Amino acid sequence: MSTEFEVRLFASLKDRAGHSRVRVAVPEPMTVQGLTAAIAAAYPALAAALPSALVAVNQEFAFADTPLRPGDEIALFPPVSGGSGGEFPYPTFFALTAEPVDLNAITAHLTRPEVGAIVFFHGSVRGETQRQGLPAQTNHLEYEAYEAMARQKMGQIAQEIWQRWPQVRGVAMVQRLGRLEVGDTTTVVACAAGHRDQGAFEAARYGIDRLKEIVPVWKKEVGADRTVWIEGAYQPTRDDIAPA
């Protein structure tokens, strides 16, 4: 007996399959391991990418022994390019958008009477790349995200920040999507505190590093002579699952 599942594909896996969704029948006992085996058999173009691919079930990282149930939302994607919120004790601002980022609006959102410092990480598209395997000259980038899961993971990162730096008084994360030209803003992470020495710098650095580990966002680097999906090496563990 088997059950059919629909699987969403992202970034290079979507390109390999030629589709954004595939359907596979998974035999009992239904697990992620059985799912990936079924995908490899039904879609040979995806087989070579599966050993490093990540699986999410109901917008949370899943592992080989994770059980599957009829109706589960399943996504398959490469390591993010570089991964639940609940109630937050202080102001937060999370967004995935194709629109330009308004830094003044973020500042206003995080500003409170007790806030005296806001530290920003502001990423932008560079026109030259010195990393092996990438186009030397970048024409533009194209960003894609698993948006529902990405917002949850941004919330998880904010909670992790407050666990490490309890004096932080606000967290903002914005990820641009779609086509971005050289010089355009790609990512913004901002952390507010009463004073600059109360964790704002460290929290902002942690925020961007963690965003590149667990928030499902990918970028395609487009040069004059080739196009490359940028995929990270980080493999999530069960420690990266948000607390229930």
Image (tube, rainbow, N blue to C red):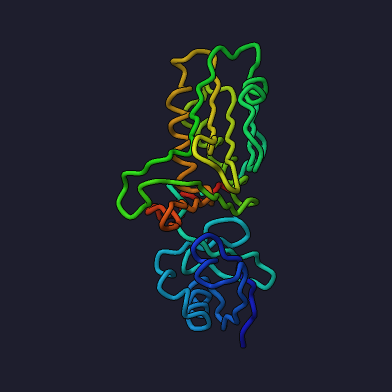
Q: Quadrant of residue 170?
A: top right
Residue farthest along the bottom direction in this orientation:
1
Q: Does residue 83 appear anywhere in the picture? A: yes
Q: Position of residue 25 (x, y in %)?
A: 60, 82
Task: Give the residue at x 40% y 64%.
Answer: 52
Q: Is residue 151 left or right of residue 62?
A: right
Residue farthest along the right direction in this orientation:
71
Task: Give the residue at x 44% y 15%.
Answer: 197
Compared with 199, 97 (above or below) is below
Q: Does residue 90 appear anywhere in the picture? A: no
Q: Which one is nearer the viewer's eye here, 51 or 187? A: 187
Compared with 77, 122 (above or below) is above
Q: Quadrant of residue 26?
A: bottom right
Image label count:
0
Q: Quadrant of residue 154?
A: top right
Q: Position of residue 2 (x, y in %)?
A: 61, 84
Residue farthest along the front direction in this orientation:
224
Q: Is residue 21 left or right of residue 186?
A: right
Q: Quadrant of the N terminus?
A: bottom right
Compared with 21, 134 (above or below) is above
Task: Give the residue at x 47% y 46%.
Answer: 139
Q: Position of residue 70 (x, y in %)?
A: 67, 73
Q: Is residue 119 left or right of residue 151?
A: left
Q: Position of residue 137 (x, y in %)?
A: 39, 46
Task: Give the residue at x 40% y 73%.
Answer: 48
